[in-house]
């Protein structure tokens, strides 16, 4: 079965092998040496001043960023499940909250952000997804972050990059905290989150806040290649390996291939009549609006050995989402769009003529080295 959901993503065999060794103790020079290498590679991935790993799913890192970087009031952008989640975290901790709400297919507007900040000088943090996975949407985060910093450089820009870090190069010039999760573009099992931090963020964190998610405690320990609590040793061994694999290929080529697969998948789906859902699609996944999405998914799973994701809430049964993150062999992506075309044939929507594969290959090979 091909796992083509936008998280979790398949773990490469080399990484699974690396993680198959006996458990080692986390307070040992052996583990600290591995942690040091993983940390150095992670710093190169983020391209930021500091980074920490947390033994939690991605949401834990979102929470840690809110509790350590927002003191008064947060502006959150809700254009889907994950943007909504930032708002819920802010509310759970009793912080002030302003929410900008958009339809799940609509990217945030820079002018709305400007107006919200002008309206409320108490706002000291912005929380936004780079790629909002609920609708496969890409927010113009770099542009928004620049505007926020122009208004007030002390406002912390917290970017959820869980389906963006490892997908495309991100301009972190105006980003203070960049969140990544193990089970999405980094192709690891679920259970670990990572945060890239700016110097300004480290300064604002100060003594930190909270207990388990006190980022000051973690920074202090992790700078010494250890963690405040028991480290997710197996996942860190996997992280070191997967980043080594990506670095071996080179980030430029890795991002170029992801982009080529994304453009090819989109073009192939459109060529067979699919309606792409978001107005600004992310490179992490293709989200297709389809009244018969459940049938498409069922046929893919039972007849073609492909597992893709559906939609949530009001898009339940009306959306299917195909992953593009990770070191995916190109023939697997080609097979997936081909399977969607066969599903349409089975559903008497469009006779199969090989169009999806043809367009996929044309677009992929036009972009693979571009
Ligand atoms: C998956 C995901 C998360 C985190 O979810 P967890 O289940 O806590 O790992 C957060 N934001 C986005 C955009 C995601 O895709």
Image: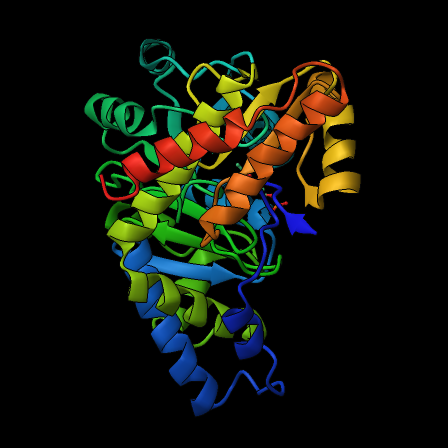
Q: Is residue 345 left or right of residue 40?
A: right
Residue 201 seen: no
Q: Is residue 232 left or right of residue 330?
A: right
Query: Is 27 placed above or below 48 here?
Result: below
Give the x, y percent position of residue 199: 25, 51
Q: Between 176 and 102, which is closer to the camera in this rendering?
A: 102
Q: Farthest residue toward the front?
A: 353
Query: Is 13 placed above or below 181 here?
Result: below
- The quadrant holding residue 141 is top left
Quadrant holding ligand 1? top right
Give the x, y percent position of residue 335: 57, 41
- The quadrant holding residue 4 is top right
Q: What residue sits 47% from the left and 55% below the top?
A: 186
Q: What residue sits 64% from the left and 35% below the top?
A: 339
Give the x, y percent position of residue 159: 40, 37
Q: What residue sits 36% from the left and 15% below the top?
A: 113
Q: Between 120 and 329, which is closer to the camera in this rendering?
A: 329
| Quadrant of the snapshot with the C terminus | top left
Q: Is residue 287 left or right of residue 40?
A: right
Q: Is residue 301 left or right of residue 170?
A: right
Q: What residue sits 54% from the left and 47% below the top?
A: 332
Residue 145 seen: yes
- The quadrant holding residue 154 is top left
Give the x, y percent position of residue 331: 50, 48
Coloring scheme used: rainbow
């Amino acid at each position: 079965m091909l796992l083509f959901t936008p998280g979790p993503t398949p773990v490469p065999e080399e990484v699974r092998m690396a993680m198959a060794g006996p458990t080692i103790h986390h307070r040992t020079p052996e583990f600290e040496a591995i942690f040091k290498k993983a940390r150095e590679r992670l710093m190169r991935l983020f391209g930021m001043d500091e980074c920490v790993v947390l033994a939690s799913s991605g949401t834990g890192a979102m929470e840690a960023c809110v509790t350590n970087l927002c003191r008064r009031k947060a502006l959150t952008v809700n254009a889907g499940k994950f943007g909504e989640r930032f708002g819920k975290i802010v509310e759970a901790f009793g912080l002030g909250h302003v929410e900008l709400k958009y339809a799940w297919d609509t990217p945030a507007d820079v002018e709305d952000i400007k107006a919200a900040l002008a309206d409320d000088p108490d706002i000291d943090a912005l929380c936004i997804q780079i790629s909002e996975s609920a609708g496969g949407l890409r927010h113009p985060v770099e542009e928004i972050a620049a505007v926020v910093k122009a208004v007030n450089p002390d406002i912390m820009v917290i970017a959820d990059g869980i389906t963006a870090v490892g997908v495309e190069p991100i301009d972190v010039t105006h980003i203070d905290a960049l969140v990544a999760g193990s089970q999405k573009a980094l192709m690891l099992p679920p259970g670990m989150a990572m945060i890239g931090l700016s110097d300004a963020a480290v300064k604002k964190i100060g003594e930190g806040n909270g207990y388990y998610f006190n980022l000051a405690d973690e920074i202090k320990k992790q700078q010494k290649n250890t963690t405040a609590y028991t480290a997710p040793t197996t996942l860190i061994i996997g992280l070191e390996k997967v980043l080594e694999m990506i670095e071996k290929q080179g980030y430029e080529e890795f991002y170029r291939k992801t982009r080529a697969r994304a453009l090819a998948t989109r073009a192939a789906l459109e060529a067979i009549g699919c309606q792409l859902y978001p107005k600004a699609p992310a490179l992490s996944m293709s989200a297709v609006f389809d009244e018969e999405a459940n049938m498409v998914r069922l046929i893919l799973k039972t007849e073609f050995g492909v597992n893709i994701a559906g939609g949530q809430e009001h898009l339940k049964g009306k959306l299917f989402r195909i992953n593009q993150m990770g070191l995916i062999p190109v023939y697997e992506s080609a097979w997936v769009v081909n399977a969607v075309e066969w599903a349409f044939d089975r559903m008497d929507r469009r006779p199969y003529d090989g169009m999806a594969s043809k367009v996929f290959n044309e677009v992929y090979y036009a972009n693979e080295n571009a």
